[in-house]
Image: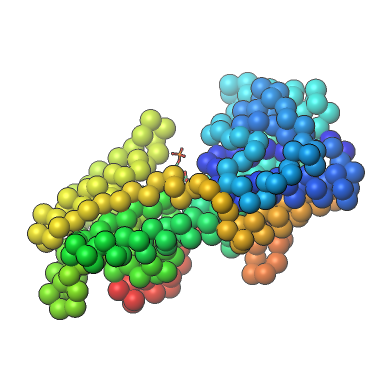
Amino acid sequence: MRVGLLTGGGDVPGLNAAIRAVVKRGEGEHGHSIVGFRNGWKGLAEGDVLPMTRHHIRNVLATGGTLLGTARFHPRADDGSLDAVLATLEAERIEAVICIGGDGTLHAASKVAEAGVRVVAVPKTIDNDVWGTDRSIGFDTAVTIATEAVDRIHTTAESHNRVMIVEVMGRHAGWIAATAGIAGGAEVVLAPEEPFDIDKIVRFLKHRHRAHASFSIMVVAEGAVPAEGTSMSYEVQLGRFGEIVAGAIGERLGKEIAERTGFDTRVSVLGHVQRGGTPTPADRILGSRFGVAAIDAVTAGESAVMTALRGEEVVLVPLADIAGKVKQVPVDLLETARALA
Ligand code: F6P
């Protein structure tokens, strides 16, 4: 069988492990030909083919990024791009597609499946907010990087008696903020799930600096917002495509905290460093497991499903079940972060 393979949306460490697993298992065990498409759904629409053999996946397990390239592009019926995808699949005699991606790519996957294509999806996002799976590829590496950053900021915060605000990725869910905040011992963790009250934070910081310590670390998700009716008015900064702008809430909070407390305050926006470089063992393993599960699912005739981690097991969940949902951080995780302040 000829199986198409693509990676879409923002890259994450661990994608190459998944690609490698699809190719090794697909060729070796099942005798399939794996046909890669460059730059996500865009490459499929444009017929930008990169045939994948064992030769292409040599020495990629420990590398970051995606050797197929990626793009934020979603085929649509109304602009002809969905038809272009179907035409490429026919021209290349592709019988099934494995797509590795986050929300947008998975949404596109269900549209392509509805058009009659056999599609199996694999979840990846450092945000860990794909519904239906305990983990997505990339999250573990991002938390490792963010935790190391918080550890490093700790020493300079203490030396200078400063409040340090560390902004991490997470527009719709605060998984990185909550976990790196707990692992790094942050005093304040702010996530989109629980809008904050700036007065409470200021009272807490003033008390802490009077009573226990002369420095504090706040880990803030880029999608954190003040609660309605509290004393900080804030309009969410949106970019060209309606996306939350990185750095905006961190910078604004830095100003508010400095003005309201008088404490010397600095802001670090970690940004894309969280998505780069070598994947952790956990992400290499998850990518490998999802890759094997995806090609096995395709071979078994499955379609419109996504590989998912549930506890210790990899299972398949229908794409229809995850559509339009965001997996948010559970209350107890945020409560743990607060309890350890
Ligand atoms: O969706 C993954 C993610 O890394 C988010 O955490 C972040 O908000 C966004 O992508 C950044 O997107 P871009 O790479 O387009 O700037």
Quadrant occupied by the C terminus: bottom left
Residue at x 72% of width, y 27% of height? 49
Residue 295 location in percent, x, y?
A: 79, 48
Q: Confirm whether residue 104 shows in the render.
A: no
Q: Is residue 166 above or below residue 103?
A: below
- Asked whether, in this view, residue 125 is left or right of residue 166, the answer is right
Residue 95 location in percent, x, y?
A: 82, 35
Residue at x 29% of width, y 44% of height? 248
Q: Is residue 333 above or below residue 275?
A: below
Q: Confirm whether residue 19 shows in the render.
A: yes
> Depth check: 285 or 277 in front?
277
Name the image colouring.
rainbow
Q: Is residue 243 above or below residue 337?
A: above
Residue 240 location in percent, x, y?
A: 38, 30
> Depth check: 54 or 236 in front?
54
Residue at x 80% of width, y 26% of height? 92
Q: Is residue 240 above or below residue 234?
A: above
The image quadrant that residue 71 belongs to is top right
